[in-house]
Image (cartoon, rainbow, N blue to C red):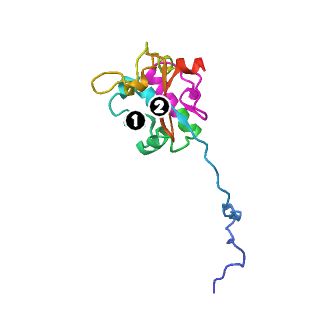
Amino acid sequence: MNQHPPTSFRLHKPGQRQKRPVKRVPFTRKVSQQEIHNRIKAILEHIQDYYFQGASHLARDAGISRSALSRLMSGRSSPSYALVCTLTSVLENKLGRRVDPRDIISLDGEYLTPSICELTGCKGCLPKQVSDKEGAVNPEYRHIRSGKWSLDTSAQGDRLVSIEREAEE
């Protein structure tokens, strides 16, 4: 009769690596996830290759799933360091300029380069949200100036920011 020793692991043949027993501890402490902010949507609006289905094309170029990028862009997930580096590299190649990862992802909604137009090399534009279907400026966005804005996305949603207003405060 072939019986195993009364230990929690079997004997190994000579030359085989022996596995150490792993003590499993139930995870009981709840970890609070810090809210992550990003400006990926605003950057995509400034790259011609991403005008149509930008997120899908960025996911393909970065070698990640569309759902992973979607969760990141909507603020529902925290990116790994490797993912931030990959996205930064892809965006740098498309923009033709160096981009600091802290201008893409932020822990507090503050970025090194406040203006998205300055970050991307745009001469100055207005975000899509400023105008209605007829091209008239929406009253709540009258304070937004060409080239002086940023779009911050977190789990709380999108927040259009006027750079001039932040400077005044």
Task: Name the residue nearer the viewer: 13 or 77.
Answer: 77
Task: Name the residue nearer the viewer: 54 or 24.
Answer: 54
Give the residue at x 61% y 33%.
Answer: 108
Residue 119 among those drawn in magenta: no
- Percent position (x, y) of residue 73? 47, 38
Residue 77 lies left or right of residue 25; in this view the side is left
- Looking at marks 2 and 1 on the same chain, the residue that comes earlier in the sequence is marked by 2
Q: Label 1 sits on what residue type?
A: Ala
- Percent position (x, y) of residue 109? 57, 31
- The residues bearing labels 2 and 1 have C-alpha atoms spaced at a distance of 9 Å
Q: Residues within 10 Å of mark 1 (few under 14, many from 20)?
A: some
State whether residue 160 is above or below residue 78: above
Quadrant of the snapshot with the C terminus:
top right
State whether residue 5 is above or below residue 111: below
The image shows a total of numbered marks equal to 2
Quadrant of the snapshot with the N terminus:
bottom right
Q: Are marks 2 and 1 in contact (CB under 8 Å)?
A: yes
Q: Which residue matches tag 1?
A: 55
- Percent position (x, y) of residue 134? 27, 24
Q: Which residue matches tag 2?
A: 40
Q: Residues within 10 Å of mark 2 (few under 14, many from 20)?
A: many
Region of the chain picked out in magenta, as a range = 86-113
Task: Name the residue nearer the viewer: 46 or 19.
Answer: 46
Task: Return the residue found at the far bottom.
Answer: 1
Give the residue at x 43% y 43%.
Answer: 65
Task: Name the residue nearer the viewer: 104 or 74.
Answer: 74
Judged from the image, the secondary structure of the residue bearing numbered disc 1 is: helix
Q: Label 2 sits on what residue type?
A: Ile
Q: Which mark is residue 109?
A: none
State whether residue 11 is above or below residue 67: below
Give the residue at x 54% y 35%.
Answer: 37
Give the residue at x 61% y 46%.
Answer: 33
